[in-house]
Image (spheres, helix red, strand yellow):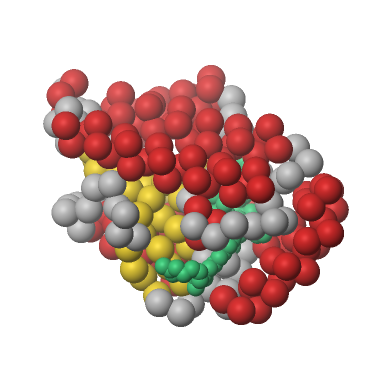
Amino acid sequence: MILKNCVGLITGASQGLGKAFAESLLKKGAQVVICDINQAQGEITRAEFDLRYGPGRTAFITCDVTSLPQLKDVFSQTVQTFGRLDVLCNNAGINNENSWERTISVNLVALIQASYLALDHMRRDRGGKGGSIINVASMSGFVPAAHAPVYTASKHGVLGFTRSLAEASSLGNYGVRINALCPSFVNTEILETVNHEENLGIFYQFKDNVKNLMQAFGVLEPSDVANGFVQLLEDDNLNGAVMKITTSKGIHFENY
Ligand SMILES: NC(=O)C1=CN([C@@H]2O[C@H](COP(=O)(O)OP(=O)(O)OC[C@H]3O[C@@H](n4cnc5c(N)ncnc54)[C@H](O)[C@@H]3O)[C@@H](O)[C@H]2O)C=CC1
Ligand SMILES: CC/C=C\C[C@H](O)/C=C/C=C\C=C\C=C\C(=O)[C@@H](O)C/C=C\CCC(=O)O
């Protein structure tokens, strides 16, 4: 996909990885819609992008991705504002074993809902122009995590859903590529959750285990992951791919 002039929608993009993904699209000449439950930070990020990349290329929409009406409104506003939708990145995610139902709602259910809404706009077999969906999973889709069993389950679900929807898209000639991104630990706010019992709940006793993992495996920067994000978008041969990004091996793919 040529990213210049494309339109990308990224969930949970007020900060962290989503913000880095949005910026990588802007650098390629695309237009972006960033949506997030954190309105204050989202407005700050939009203003920052307006200054850096010019006004009118970034829209921010406040949205709780677990609300289907709000999610539908984001897609409608995206097409109303920029005329089309070429890229969806399901990035919004939380790590909370206490509110584990919400963790599943944000990390998996909302990702599924948004993927289906994007397909409604993109599918060539229904008059769309095709497109690309990137679902943000995690290396916890491969490595057990005593501190976060439900978070881990949500990311395993993202991988299964992504690979299966990609198969459906291929067999059904949707013209939509659907791939997964599995970063190892990245220097963002979510890493802070390991220090809070309100996040880890009964698994707080294992907080040192995950800190040892971070020590062993290292911590990436968002820009390292954004490079993989762009590769998944620009390489039209990739559909159903599971890209891993680690400090030890960099960008590589799971061969199932
Ligand atoms: N930081 C890391 O070590 C890794 C993160 N990931 C994944 O990357 C994605 C992005 O997380 P990070 O940028 O690292 O953390 P982050 O906590 O900085 O960013 C998450 C963003 O999602 C937003 N968000 C949370 N719940 C939402 C909701 N209901 N509706 C809309 N937005 C919501 C937050 O406001 C925040 O802006 C997540 O899916 C996470 O699981 C995957 C592997 C490693
Ligand atoms: C607690 C913070 C919340 C979320 C951060 C993130 O989603 C959780 C990650 C959990 C585990 C990360 C494991 C990282 C492993 C590596 O970096 C690899 O180098 C070693 C593991 C497997 C090697 C297989 C391979 O690289 O293909």
Percent from the top left, x then y, of residue 1?
Answer: 19, 52
Q: Quadrant of residue 196?
A: bottom right
- Name the one closer to the observer, 56 or 226: 226
> Looking at the image, is 105 positioned above or below residue 153?
above
- Name the one closer to the observer, 96 or 4: 96
Quarter in which the C terminus is drawn:
bottom left
Q: Quadrant of residue 207?
A: bottom right
Percent from the top left, x then y, of residue 79?
Answer: 34, 30
> Residue at coordinates 46% horizontally, 79% vertically from top-left?
248
Q: In the rendered view, does 245 fall on the left or right side of 129?
A: right
Quadrant in which ligand 2 is drawn: bottom right
> Residue at coordinates 52% horizontally, 66% vertically from top-left?
184
Percent from the top left, x then y, of residue 217?
Answer: 57, 76
Percent from the top left, x then y, of residue 225?
Answer: 44, 66
> Residue at coordinates 31% horizontally, 35% vertically from top-left?
165
- Count the labels in the image: 0
> Looking at the image, is 21 positioned above or below residue 106?
below
Q: In the rendered view, does 122 fall on the left or right side of 143?
A: left
Q: In this rendering, does residue 251 appear at all?
A: yes
Q: In this rendering, does residue 63 appear at all?
A: no
> Residue at coordinates 62% horizontally, 47% vertically from top-left?
151
Q: Quadrant of residue 27?
A: bottom left
